Image (spheres, rainbow, N blue to C red):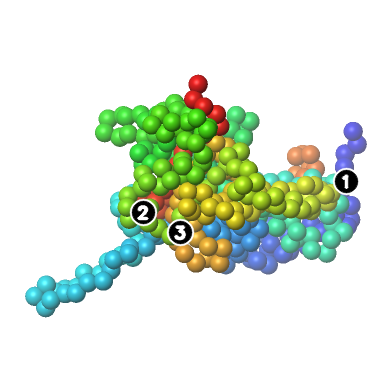
Amino acid sequence: MAKYLLSDRGRRALDTLYAAITQINAPSRGVHSSFALDPTAEQRLEDLQREQVAFLQRINVIGVRDMIGQVIGLGTEDMIASRTAEADLPRKPKYIGQMDDREYRLWDTEFDTKLPWQIIDAWSKFPDFAQRYSRHVAISVALSRIAVGWHGITAAASTNPVANPNGEDVNIGWLQKLRLEKADHVMGRATVTNGDVTTATGAAEPIYIGNNADMAAGDYKNIDALAYDLISGMPSWARSSTEHVVLVSQDLVDEKYFPMINRPLADTIDGGRAISDVVTRDIVMSSKQIGGRPAAIVPKFPEGTMVVTPLAQPNGSGSSNLSIYYQEGSRRRYIRDEPENKASLVDYNSVNEGYVIEDTDFMVMAENITFGDRP
């Protein structure tokens, strides 16, 4: 097969992209050497991801200084009112979050992409080539982060995308954090005790939903009953939160909960047209409730799973219990042509980041859910 050569128009489009990135980040050595993103560019990248993938607007994405540190605890302390007699001075201010000596840990994560020269030529006709490219990279990075948040189990030294297509070995995600940190808030999986530590990391213990199900046997007649039971397992101060959302996988719900939504056509990176389900990038809220709480389908959520936890509102109001922490100043990037890499533009990106549940009291989960009576 003849080697593909980039057209003059494609080369001009690439030069425009390089110039735009240089202007934003002002790397002293240019984009073809590794450079760190300055704080403004770093925040712009986070904002672009949140604009393109709506679920990131419902969680906390927070820059922190250290690779290992104490969880910030963004849940609001609901009793700060007090009075202090003169004999009891000084006054004792309270932190408005929840700090309970839980640690976070960040891991170096690579988000490397490539764009074949054929695609660059196809897209070079668009005057907004640089912005278009940035949007698609932002979408890919955002969806990857969300997938790891739901599916991540370990942080391997070298990941295997074939064996772990959802990033199971990229980082320790929110669901695994709950299994490790709050075993009694997880249904559908056996617990394992090692020394004084008990985790919900054992074998699957399926939960069945069926007309003849017996709740005493751990089974339910419908998903509403399961949601109510999950919420009742929270401490009283947690289950009374008005910000809880019931996150469910698509396989657990039908048109009763989620009326048919339009599935628009969307531009693809190859310049063609492809069917894009709204659920792929957006959080889809139901007009009905599950277990007396708003219900939602979110991107990349695992099948047979239900989670109840507070999420922020799309406008940023309210409090979310789910966070991604990234280390400020840790983003590294360099871009270059790699003719040896099947004639592609290669864009190397990395950042130190990790997944955090701000307060495990405010999160419960059921997994390995299936329909039918227990065998």
**Residue highlighted by disc 3:** 243
Q: Earlier in the sequence, mark 3 or mark 2?
A: 2
Q: Residue at x 26, y 71 (%)?
A: 81
Q: Residue at x 21, y 69 (%)?
A: 92
Between the C-alphas of marks 3 and 2, the distance is 10 Å
Judging depth in this view, the residue of 174 and 277 nearest the camera is: 277
Q: Earlier in the sequence, mark 1 or mark 2?
A: 1
Between the C-alphas of marks 1 and 3, the distance is 55 Å
- Mark 2, secondary structure of its residue: helix
Task: Say which of marks 1 and 3 sits in front.
Answer: 3
Mark 1 and mark 2 residues within 8 Å of each other at the beta carbon: no
Q: Amino acid at mark 1?
A: Leu
Percent position of residue 114, x then y: 72, 45
Q: Earlier in the sequence, mark 1 or mark 3?
A: 1
Percent position of residue 45, x then y: 61, 60
**Residue highlighted by disc 2:** 238
Q: Residues within 10 Å of mark 2 (few under 14, many from 20)?
A: some
Judging depth in this view, the residue of 180 and 362 nearest the camera is: 362
